Amino acid sequence: MSALVEARGLRRVLYGEVPATLINGIDMDIYADEFLAITGPSGSGKSSLLYLLGLLDVPSAGEVTIGGRPTSKLNETARARMRLETLGFVFQFHFLLPEFSALENVALPMRALGRYDDARIRKHASDILASLGLGDHAHKRPEQMSGGQRQRVAIARALANDPKLVLADEPTGNLDSASSAQVLGILRDMCGPGSGKSVVVVTHDPGLAEQADRRLHIVDGKVSP
């Protein structure tokens, strides 16, 4: 079975008076229809690894291959295009634009990709929000919604361009237990058998990690047994 994402020899070093090694020689694969949890203590390199996999950062050494395409030599324009076409992101802090409605926030990645006209973009954004139980909240701004609702809008935004891989960094970290369970259920369902999608979640939450198909434990920038 071929991997959706392959990482080989990944290193990330912050150079300065005292260099800091964030990621130190990680090899890993991510497969279609997989829910993968990345766990480890604070400062172990979990988020740094996620940013490398999501092309938000460039490795100091090694390679990330997505859909058979090596990415380390891509320029920023090509990296941004691949992020828009292939990847979706959900963070602990939803990063919704406060002046925009939920529907307008979800529409943003589609507008950036530039494939569809405005009517189709708005219809698709509305459909995604409805599928996440937010049909009646499409025209609300973030400040008018609860934390769980805002995080579901962030998930809708991540799904806007039908990505193959969704990367989530502590997506339940700011939520109460009921909202956390709801968000976890959404993430789990989106990578079910035959979906062709994968979800990678960085988490400190043992309950979330237990729901994963597989766990990757990181300690000091390395994969730990």
Image (cartoon, rainbow, N blue to C red):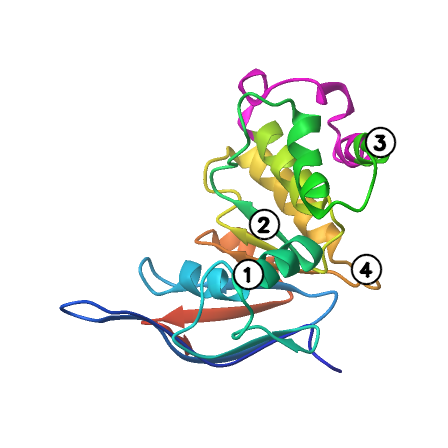
Foreground disc of the pair 2, 3: 3
Question: Is 82 or 151 nearer to us in this picture?
Answer: 82
Relative to 135, is 12 above or below? below
- Which dot marks residue 123? 3
Residue 208 in picture, x, y percent from top left = 55, 52
**For mark 4, does the 10 Å Cα neighbourhood hold few (<14), some (14 to 19), or many (20 or more) residues?**
few
Position of 170 with respect to 156 (left or right) is left
Q: Which residues are magenta?
A: 125-147
Q: Earlier in the sequence, mark 4 or mark 1?
A: 1
Q: Which residue is mark 4?
A: 195
Q: Earlier in the sequence, mark 3 or mark 1?
A: 1
- Which dot marks residue 88? none
Q: Main secondary structure of the magenta part?
A: helix
Q: Helix or strand or loop: what does disc 3 sit on?
A: helix
Q: Helix or strand or loop: what does disc 2 sit on?
A: strand
Residue occupying image coordinates x 53% and y 18%: 143
Foreground disc of the pair 4, 1: 1
